Image (cartoon, grey):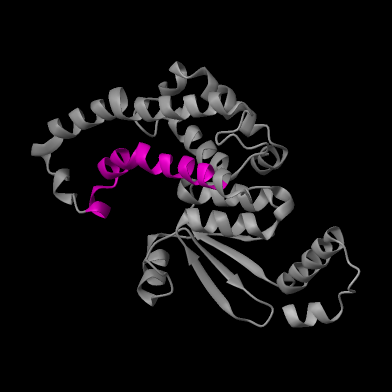
Amino acid sequence: RVRDVAAVIPHTCNLRQLLAIARMAKRAREEGTTHKLLYFDFPGKAEAIRLALTHAGVAFEDHRFADRAEFQALKASGRLQFGQVPALEVTTAAGETTVLTQSAAILRYVAKLNDSANLYPADPLLAARVDAVCDLEADAFVGVRVSKYKERFGFGFLNEDKYAGELAGVAEALNKEVVPRHLSNLAKLLERGGTGWLAGTREPSIADFVWGPVLDSINNGWTGDANALTAFPSLRTFHARFREIPSVKAYYA
């Protein structure tokens, strides 16, 4: 508690000492807290969180549903705030559990668990830039996700055979126009930043952890064009660099 910490701070403490005391208090508060990540047994939206937790040195249980029924039961229980995953169960030493949802919110929470990992800037302008790069990923692939997971967005009727031609046209437009446009914007941002990281941060931020696994998926043909990065050498360079981050490399090893 602030009152308890203040009681033992000498009046002669300088800023460095105060920061050290604050870090000690934070560690004491978080001691005994456990983290359990809930998701399916594939990368998806959880991969950025898995990698960020690993990079930040936060121990966690990587729980992957045995089947769809397990997820449906969890959803029906009401434990998921928005009825979706990834979700992160945070349990304190006192046994109190909070379930966090929304992948970007979870990533920002993870970043705050270890300030020394520098996953999220303290500077508000740079933090806004990191947020913008994360949001760009959502914009870039909303069409891909709607066309792939139609029922989730209320377009289940498009599974009918009579719409096959229209869907093929959508896939072509996404891969020839929409996705390349967003990748071009990302490449320009990367090149303008000058640090080798997407938001122009000195070290990898949560924005890089959002995009790294997505670029893996693109190369694996997720969007329908496994060669989509061919036209963007700076993004290919970034992707290779991301995969060489020691924590990321160790995770995949």
Q: Residue at x 85, y 58 (%)?
A: 16
Say left or right for 77 vs 153.
right
Give residue 92's quadrant in the image.
Answer: bottom right
Q: Residue at x 55, y 36 (%)?
A: 199
Q: In this view of the protein, can residue 40 be seen by the observer?
A: no
The magenta segment is: 127-153
Q: In this view of the protein, can residue 244 be seen by the observer?
A: yes
Query: Can you say whether 186 is above or below 161 in the image?
Result: above
User: Whole-percent x and y of residue 221?
Assistant: 40, 30
Q: Residue at x 60, y 33 (%)?
A: 197
Asked whether 137 falls inside the magenta stretch, the response is yes
User: Whole-percent x and y of residue 8?
Assistant: 87, 79
Q: Report the quarter where the N terminus lies.
A: bottom right
- Please identify the residue farthest to the left as the structure is shown: 162
User: Whole-percent x and y of residue 155?
Assistant: 18, 49
Query: Can you say whether 155 is above or below 144 in the image?
Result: below
Say left or right for 236 vs 229.
right
Asked whether 146 falls inside the magenta stretch, the response is yes
Q: Report the quarter where the C terminus lies.
A: top right
Query: Can you say whether 191 is above or below 148 in the image?
Result: above
User: Whole-percent x and y of residue 46?
Assistant: 50, 51
- Please identify the residue farthest to the front as the structure is shown: 11
